[in-house]
Image (cartoon, rainbow, N blue to C red):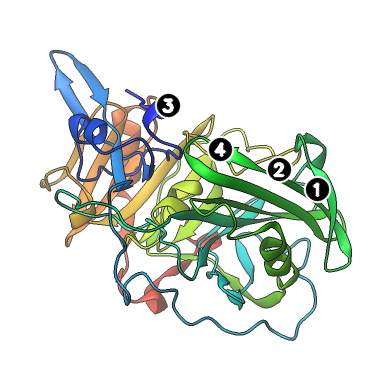
């Protein structure tokens, strides 16, 4: 059951969080949240329940926990390359004034994703347990998408005004959005036929300003290319499915941005046929984090991030199967695309590395048969 009238940002189907439907209804009118699998049996039926990462009433995480962490200064490097090896990160985190782009956590066949933080604003991308006390201060939900050459279609950005970003062509849209004081979208051509987009929704109508975002965008530079790695290797994939998206220390897509600091390990998206890599206006699954068409997902998360009970062997619900290994939940979610037998076979062939030591992880392109 979706409750999109209660939230601005949904995500797709990672393992379940800590809240049930009643708690969501009580949580307020706006939240950064992701949708986790929480299947509640009713006779023969199963109902999906949404999970909240941080409700509108959740307070700041504290001066230490919520303050932006130090980021490397803008590198003296050229523009981010418009293309790269598959599933390779090509830029680093950086800071411009009070705004900070975090290290990218997600890379797909069409784009890379990174969170954006601001001094003085709270980003609720970390789950909070218990009853949240009254909320104080202003919130921000912001992220950067760096699209590969040809992937983004700027002509579909409605109501945009032309701007210049670091001497390059850009487009800008600003206005109130649901319960946010302002939502700003800045798209710019960072390289030949290649666009990047910053989306920023803030409770503070003046910050970040349009100029703040243009200045931040102008600071984007190439980093040392780094192949995405995952803590799993797979021995089996269903025929025709190929890796589409990978996330490190996060869920895939905008799910991972909405919960970037929640301590998840990895996510993988497999698609058949391949998802489109041209004509895009947003990441796969969209701002609601829906299951991409023709795709199944794998999530690797700590047991503490799941509201399902660990069990021996492999257990399946309605459209997903779980395997528990040393306090880690590995889940395949297909929303009925695959049979339980097929999802079980996938999970049986998974080898788990040390989730807390990325040096033991496998380069994503080598993690599948």
Residue in the picture at 21% in, 48% down: 306
Q: Is residue 87 above or below residue 320?
A: below
What's the distance in space between the residues labelled 4 and 2, CA to CA? 28 Å
Quarter assignment of residue 233: bottom left
Q: Is mark 2 on a helix, strand or loop?
A: loop
Residue assigned mark 3 = 337
The crowding category of the residue bearing disc 1, from other C-alpha atoms within 10 Å (few below 14, some 14 to 19, many at least 20), is: some
Residue assigned mark 4 = 177
Q: In this view, does 258 lie above or below 260?
A: above
Whichever of labels 4 and 3 marks the residue nearer the N terminus, that label is 4
Residue assigned mark 1 = 150
> Quarter of the image containing the N terminus?
top left
Q: Is mark 4 on a helix, strand or loop?
A: strand
Q: What element carries label 1?
A: loop
- Please state if 58 lies on the left or on the right of 247 as rendered: left
Whichever of labels 4 and 1 marks the residue nearer the N terminus, that label is 1
What's the distance in space between the residues labelled 1 and 3, CA to CA? 29 Å
Eye-nearest disc, 4 or 2: 4
Whichever of labels 3 and 2 marks the residue nearer the N terminus, that label is 2
Look at the numbered discs 1 and 3 and tell me whether their residues touch, using CB distance below 8 Å. no
Residue assigned mark 2 = 277
Look at the numbered discs 4 and 1 and tell me whether their residues touch, using CB distance below 8 Å. no
| Residue 102 badge | none
Eye-nearest disc, 1 or 3: 1
What's the distance in space between the residues labelled 1 and 2, CA to CA? 8 Å
Evaluate whether residue 238 shows in this view.
no
């Amino acid at each position: 059951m979706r409750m999109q009238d209660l939230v601005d940002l949904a995500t797709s189907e990672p393992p379940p969080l800590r809240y049930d439907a009643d708690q969501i209804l009580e949580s307020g009118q706006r939240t950064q949240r992701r949708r986790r699998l929480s299947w509640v049996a009713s006779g023969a039926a199963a109902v999906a329940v949404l999970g909240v990462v941080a409700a509108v009433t959740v307070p700041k995480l504290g001066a230490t926990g919520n303050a932006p962490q130090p980021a490397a200064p803008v590198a003296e490097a050229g523009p981010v390359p418009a293309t790269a090896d598959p599933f390779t990160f090509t830029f680093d985190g950086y800071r411009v004034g009070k705004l900070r782009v975090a290290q990218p956590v997600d890379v797909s066949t069409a784009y890379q994703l990174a969170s954006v933080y601001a001094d003085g604003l709270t980003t609720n991308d970390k789950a909070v347990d218990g009853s949240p006390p009254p909320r104080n201060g202003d919130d921000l939900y912001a992220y950067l998408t760096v699209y590969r050459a040809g992937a983004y279609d700027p002509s579909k950005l409605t109501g945009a005004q032309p701007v210049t970003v670091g001497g390059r062509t850009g487009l800008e849209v600003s206005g109130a959005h649901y319960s946010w004081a302002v939502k700003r979208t800045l798209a710019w051509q960072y390289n030949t036929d290649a666009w990047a987009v910053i989306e920023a929704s803030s409770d503070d109508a003046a910050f970040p300003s349009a100029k703040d975002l243009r200045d931040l965008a102008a600071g984007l530079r190439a980093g040392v290319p780094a192949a995405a790695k995952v803590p799993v290797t797979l021995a089996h994939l269903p025929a025709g499915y190929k890796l589409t998206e990978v996330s490190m220390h996060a869920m895939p897509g905008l799910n991972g941005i909405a919960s970037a600091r929640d301590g998840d390990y990895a996510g993988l998206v497999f698609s058949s046929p391949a998802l489109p890599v041209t004509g895009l206006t947003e990441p796969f699954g969209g701002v609601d984090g829906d299951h991409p068409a023709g795709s199944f997902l794998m999530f690797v998360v700590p047991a503490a991030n799941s509201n399902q009970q660990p069990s021996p062997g492999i257990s399946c619900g309605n459209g997903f199967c779980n395997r528990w290994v040393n306090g880690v939940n590995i889940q395949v979610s297909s929303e009925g695309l695959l049979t339980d037998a097929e999802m079980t076979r996938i999970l049986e062939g998974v080898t788990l590395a040390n989730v807390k030591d990325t040096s033991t992880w496998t380069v994503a392109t080598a993690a599948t048969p």
